[in-house]
């Protein structure tokens, strides 16, 4: 709605990309963010901007499951993450795809098993 993203449908998913003539964060948004938040947000955008909506969905769902497992004091391992994502998304993502999301989250420092 703000003219920042281009969304192109591709089969069962969408390719989402930034428009060429805008920055990552608009001026009016910068005013509402603290100096600590702005670099964190820019870092997340830079790391994940090239991912498809499908990839972002499996990554964010995996992160959500990990945070819920931690909050509830439950076992946090690869199998519990796969089971948690499958409980939410059914068979939408393969075990391999969920495993890839786990690896990405670990490599980027968002998940420790």
Image (cartoon, grey):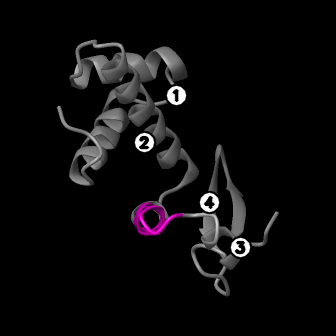
Using the image, tell me which numbered label, if any, was put on residue 28: 3
Judging by the rendered image, the residue that carries numbered circle 2 is 59
Against 15, residue 61 (above or below) is above
Farthest-out residue, right: 1
The foreground one among 97 and 77 is: 77
Judging by the rendered image, the residue that carries numbered circle 1 is 92
Most frequent secondary structure within the magenta stretch: helix
Residue at point 24%, 21% (across, down):
76
Quarter of the image where one finds residue 63: top left
Quarter of the image where one finds residue 33: bottom right
Q: Is residue 70 left or right of residue 46?
A: left
Q: Element under label 4? A: strand
- What range of the chain is rendered magenta? 34-46
Of the numbered discs 4 and 3, the one sitting upstream in the chain is: 4
Residue at point 50%, 48% (across, down):
56
User: Is 38 a magenta residue?
Assistant: yes
Q: CA distance from mark 2 to mark 1?
A: 13 Å
Of the numbered discs 1 and 3, the one sitting upstream in the chain is: 3
Residue 27: x and y in percent read: 67, 78
Using the image, tell me which numbered label, if any, was put on residue 15: 4
Crowd band around label 2 with a 10 angstrom C-alpha radius: few (<14), some (14–19), many (20+): many
């Amino acid at each position: 709605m703000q003219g920042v993203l281009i969304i192109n449908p591709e089969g069962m998913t969408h390719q989402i990309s930034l428009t060429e003539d805008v920055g990552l964060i608009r001026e009016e948004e910068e005013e509402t963010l603290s100096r600590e938040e702005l670099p964190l947000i820019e870092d997340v955008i830079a790391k994940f901007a090239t991912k498809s909506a499908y990839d972002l969905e499996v990554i964010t769902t995996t992160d959500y499951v990990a945070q819920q497992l931690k909050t509830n004091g439950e076992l946090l391992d690869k199998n519990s993450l796969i089971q948690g994502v499958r409980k939410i998304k059914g068979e939408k993502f393969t075990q391999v795809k969920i495993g890839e999301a786990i690896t990405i989250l670990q490599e980027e420092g968002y998940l420790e098993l």
